[in-house]
Image (tube, rainbow, N blue to C red):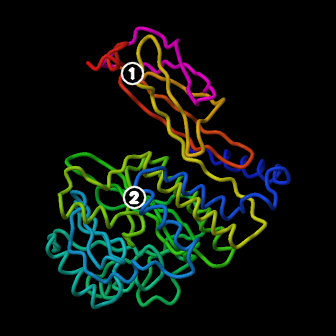
Amino acid sequence: MTLNRTLFAQATAAFVAAAACTLTGAQTSEYQRHLDAATLNAGKDPFFTGTLRPQWCWSAEHPTAPPELQDRALEPLTQIFDDLWYVGPRWVGQYIIKTSGGFFLIDTLNNTGEAQSITVPALQTLGLGANLPLLGAMPTHGHGDHFGGAAYLQTTYGIPIYLGSADAAGKPFVVTPLNSANLQPQSLQLPDRTLTLLSTPGHTPGTFSGVVPVRQDGNAYKLAFWGGTGMPTTLAPARQYLDGAERLYALARDQNVDGTMHTHPFVDGSLQHIDSIQASGRADNPFLLGNAQALRSLAILRECAAAKVAQLDATALIPEWRVTTVEFLEGGPTPVSMSARVRSGWGPVQGQQVTFSVGESGAACVATTDAGGVATCHSLPRPLRPGKDVIKASYAGSVGPSYVDLPSTSSQTLTTPGLIRAGK
């Protein structure tokens, strides 16, 4: 994986070694430190502060279920991308993927009645038939609100039901098992696309998360999904949950995902996106957060999961993950000079290297951030072409005594000196 998990292992070792110096009884508890980190990682965007931070951390902060689980109103069949639809109750639903060879379901709703009255009519509306059959379904984990309609769909259409092997026992349908013991990315091949699946035990032993390829207007995108929401109340599965969140972040970074989706759609903002599409269409698709924002969301999930582990284990020492941003200074990169600021919710990132590179040629120079988090480069090889060359500023991340600064990048087209400042 391009995201260096050794970085995180080094941070853990460094944190444990420095614990006697960095943590005292008078300081913030490890539990609260990670909740605070989730808040700082959310930044100031209302979508992150008002939806993602409260929902991802809900079961780390509350002993009761979120009230959104009581919202039984039915969400009509809603097209999210050219080949992806949502349908079902607002508290938990299913996604329908349309491929060139038929349909595939992520989750199967709550029961036979919902499969009959919601799933099948939706599929028929989309063209279910001999040429576009139902190919299969994958409940994200072994709870009834996710697999409840599977037995009816299997009996009616003869489809495979994919489920994590650790959740397979006792199900009222024949399970096509996904290997829960394999924690590396796994592939599920569909006509014209491959789903990348990831065993993320914790919510249940057989929970699976992953990445779904989708298309809109001829363009390809990818959405990450987290398969289980409520955090475990005992330590061992809580640690598995945390590990799964870290591995999903790494997978999402490797695959350069563009957004997220969730079958409890209120958790990751999918429900807001669906409502927005119903109101305004999907020309400016709200699911397309961009890679940086999608990873920010998953980093918040990771911090919430770390808080839960610390809540269950008072001796836990877990490096916090800090979302960073790289921003070119006003005026942008020019052939004369290019400067970018690296910062996080904790402030400027000082004394760290930023690499400036030219998209086509690969030419690069490296500069170090100052006390304000600003790195400046004057030495990119010429010729450079304003208006054509794209300059990428990259921060590879770093490890502190109790934290990991996550990598970040920014790209901007080379400008002519003074052009933006002059307002032209």
Identify the magenta region. Answer: 359-388
Measured as percent of width and height from the top left, residue 92 is found at 36, 77
- Establish if 61 lies above or below 79: below
Q: Give, as a three-letter code, the residue at label 1.
A: Gly
Residue at position x 33%, y 76% in the image:
93
Q: Judging from the image, what secondary structure is the residue with disc 2 in?
A: strand
Please indicate, yes or no, whether residue 292 appears anywhere in the rendered image.
yes
**Label pair 2/1, CB-CB below 8 angstroms:** no
Q: Which mark is residue 278?
A: none
Closer-to-camera residue (129/394):
394
Measured as percent of width and height from the top left, residue 267 is found at 42, 68
Residue at position x 26%, y 18% in the image:
424
Q: Relative to 214, is 210 on the left or the right?
A: right
Q: Relative to 210, is 179 on the left or the right?
A: right
Closer-to-camera residue (239/167):
239
Q: Judging from the image, what secondary structure is the residue with disc 1 in?
A: loop
Indicate yes or no whether the magenta region holds residue 376: yes
Please indicate, yes or no, whether residue 385 appears anywhere in the rendered image.
no
State the CA–CA distance, disc 2 to disc 1: 33 Å
- Label 1, residues with CA under 10 Å away: few <14, some 14-19, many ≥20: some
Indicate yes or no whether the magenta region holds residue 17: no
Residue position marked by numbered label 1 in the rendering? 331
Q: Relative to 399, is 269 on the left or the right?
A: left
Which residue appears farthest toward the top when viewing the image? 383
| Main SS class of the magenta portion in the image | loop
Tell me where residue 268 sits by quadrant.
bottom left
Residue position marked by numbered label 2 in the rendering? 260
- Establish if 229 lies above or below 341: below
